[in-house]
Amino acid sequence: MFKALVVDKSEEGVVRSEVKELENNSLPVDGNVTVAVEYSTVNYKDGLCITGNGGLVRNYPHVPGIDFAGTVEESDDDRYKVGDKVVLTGWRVGEAWWGGYAQKARVKADWLVPLPDGLSTKQAMAVGTAGFTAMLAVMALEDHGLKPDQGDVLVTGAAGGVGSIATSILASLGYSVAGVTGRPDTADYLKELGASRIVARDELNEVVKRPLESETWAGCVDAVGGAMLARVLGQMKYGASVSAVGLAGGAALPATVIPFLLRGVNLLGIDSVMQPFVNRQRAWQRVVSDLPLGKLEKMVQHATLNDLPDLGAAILKGAVQGRVVVDVNG
């Protein structure tokens, strides 16, 4: 038997989640590696799955949790043996496949990554999909020519999970970071992570009629999308790039092509779900080398399986700061 957060939907369409004890034979039969989960985390997608919003979960009952880290308990794949420490992010685990909000998970070996040297399973989940995505975003900006001496790098949604880690990574690499937040009380938190400038969300939340404004930002990690992304595109320096990682502000993009045509601006789409193994290893190694673990601890709040229903609702309201580490055995 093992404990798990189980989300179920009644015949009337009401979605509820609660911690239950399940039998081992309830795990997905198509997986070939069973992991004793130690830690998971809470992302925006997790909030959607816990509350039944967004249509991500199609089959009930369901165990959410798009990330987990733990120890291999059984394996039918030569790449992983009993006792190996592993991390999983993405691959629609926690959405279409039972996920990490449980003391055990059974998944496909192709979806796993060995835990990088220098990280504990707990630290790996402090990073999680949010930090993995942030690292991919920073790598994409660098691959398109961004260097620290080119000016301020904007991070939108800076107090959230992706934004917090992007801010910390960029600052540790020597970039001047401008963090956008709609919560004035997070200013000190962002400065502790390395932001040198705080930008109020209201300054960027409204689309202007001019397709181009003053060249302001050397790069941008954007977790908001919508009107804010449209506005930021018109403020990028010549040849600069924006890594688009989220849509907290909406999926529509009320922009023009002018920034792309007259300033050579690049809009880089960042997907963390289906990244191939080689890219995942590269990103995780960069996390170890470029994310100050002391700053990582400042971002973290701790939780158990029992806390997840409330946390799922809170993250959808933008009420979760930084990262949540879920001790599934706590």
Image (spheres, helix red, strand yellow):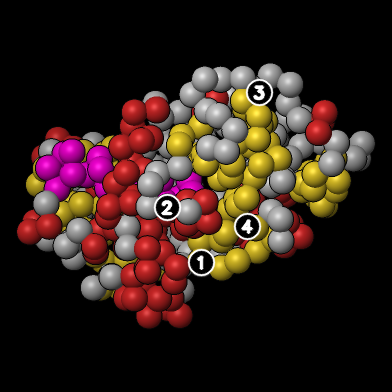
Q: Residue at x 53, y 56 (%)?
A: 122
Q: CA distance from mark 4 to mark 1?
A: 10 Å
Q: Secondary structure at mark 2?
A: loop
Q: CA distance from mark 2 to mark 1?
A: 15 Å
Evaluate whether residue 134 shows in this view: no
Between disc 4 and disc 2, the foreground one is: 2
Q: Residue at x 82, y 28 (%)?
A: 25
Inspect the image, locate mark 1, and give the three-letter code of the amino acid beneath it: Val
In the figure, is residue 328 to the left or right of 287?
right
Residue 130 highlighted magenta (yes or no): yes
Inspect the image, locate mark 3, and give the three-letter code of the amino acid beneath it: Gly
Evaluate whether residue 284 shows in this view: yes
In the figure, is residue 295 to the left or right of 153?
right
Q: Main secondary structure of the magenta part?
A: helix
Q: Are marks 3 and 1 in contact (CB under 8 Å)?
A: no
The residue where tag 1 is placed is 300
The residue where tag 4 is placed is 326
The residue where tag 2 is placed is 119
Please report the bounds of the magenta region as a residue range.
128-146
Q: CA distance from mark 4 to mark 3?
A: 23 Å
Inspect the image, locate mark 2, and give the three-letter code of the amino acid beneath it: Leu
Inspect the image, locate mark 4, and give the three-letter code of the amino acid beneath it: Val
